[in-house]
Image (cartoon, rainbow, N blue to C red):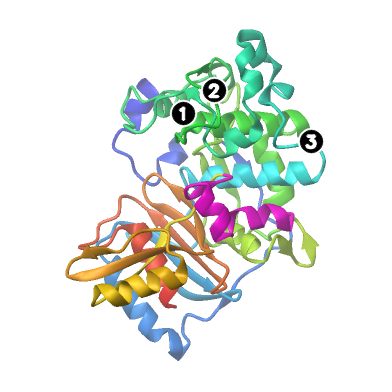
Amino acid sequence: MFRAYKVRKLQLTDHERMPFVTIQKSSAPLSFIDATTAKEYKALKTFVDSNLSASLTAAFLVIRNDSIIYEGYFNGFKSESLLPSFSVAKSFVSTLVGIALAEGKIGSLQQPVTDYLPELKKRDNRFTNITLQHLLDMRSGLQFSEGSYGIKDDAIKLGFRPNLLKHSLKVKIKTEPGKTFEYQSINTELLAVVVERVTGKKISAYLQEKVWQPLGAEHDATWNVDSKKHQQEIAFAGLNATARDFAKLGQLYLQNGVWNGQQLLQPLWVRTVNNADSMNKAGGYKNHFWSNLAYKYFKDSLAAAEYAHEQKSSTAVKKVSGKYRVGKRTAAFHAEGILNQYIYINPDKNLVIVRLGRNWYHPNKYPAQFIYELGEEL
């Protein structure tokens, strides 16, 4: 409670006050091409700047075809600033699960978690019904209350425990797995422990070896840990890095898991999250990635209904502010953190957008809406 109280007025630099381990930058750093001064992107800069001026954004990047076409830093932050990702870290953990699976260190996502964490089975044999895929899809049925993010919230209590592993393995079961989606950070923490068990490496060290170094990270990153004594990474929310280095995860997925001619991530893993049908079937959440609906607006209901029929829309036509809105699931998907941190990936447009900052303020658009509409319009 004391540790949580110290950072109750959350600042984007508070991660520096908490214990952390360092993830070393690449020995062969790779920079995106800077195309921000090109004439064709002048209007983009004007549009984005005007929309972000009062949004409490710290960093905003738009990358297309390996080139940065917009880059903005606000409120005293710079390109080299390490910023917290919060739950965007979950997508890095799931990526490491995908890599461990491809390497054969994890046999199958349909295996019970107890194959790797037998301590759970000793407490309750029902844990044998929970698979790694259940954890990845937030359908584990565990007893873990998250969403209020106050002092009694389980995610807050877990994140500030001085012995994270001990308390993670004390989790209990609430209901049968596979039935209901319930966003729970404990799922990610358990997956991180699985990765550590099968690789023999800390999750931060495995990230450094398999992602940070190969992707040419330009700066060291940090991962907050529970304490200097135990150094267990807060896997579900503790990764801090620059906007450009965060963007490289999006670029890896954009390139179907290939980086510099090397297959770092299997195409099948990527196709699970960049596929509209797969995401729609999963309700918009799969393997620790999100997928929002892209909306199109029409002046009359007939045109909207025709479009919805042609596109096999995921939603019914709805009247919003005098116009008729149709929602459709696309190949775009994203990683997301609690204070509106985003890594947005649009394979159809060859586009990555990164937004880091605090709570989002905009007169008429939610952050995901702004980012998805920007991605569709570019």
Labels 3 & 1 near each other (Cβ < 8 A): no
Instruction: Choose mark 3 or mark 1, whichever is in front.
Output: 3
Nearest to the observer: residue 314 or residue 240: 314
Q: Residue 27 location in percent, x, y?
A: 73, 58
Q: Is residue 361 visible?
A: yes
Horizontal side of residue 218 vs 104, given as left or right: left
- Determine which quarter of the picture holds residue 270: bottom right
In the rendered image, which quarter contains the N terminus?
top left
Q: Which residue is mark 3?
A: 107
Q: Amino acid at mark 3?
A: Gly
* Residue that mark 1 sits on: 159
Name the residue: 79% across, 67% down: 261
Above-or-below relation of 322 to 205 = below
**Residue type indicated by callout 1:** Gly
Position of residue 188 relative to residue 94, above or below, is: above
Mark 2, residue position: 164
Of labels 3 and 1, earlier in sequence is: 3
In the image, which residues are magenta? 265-287
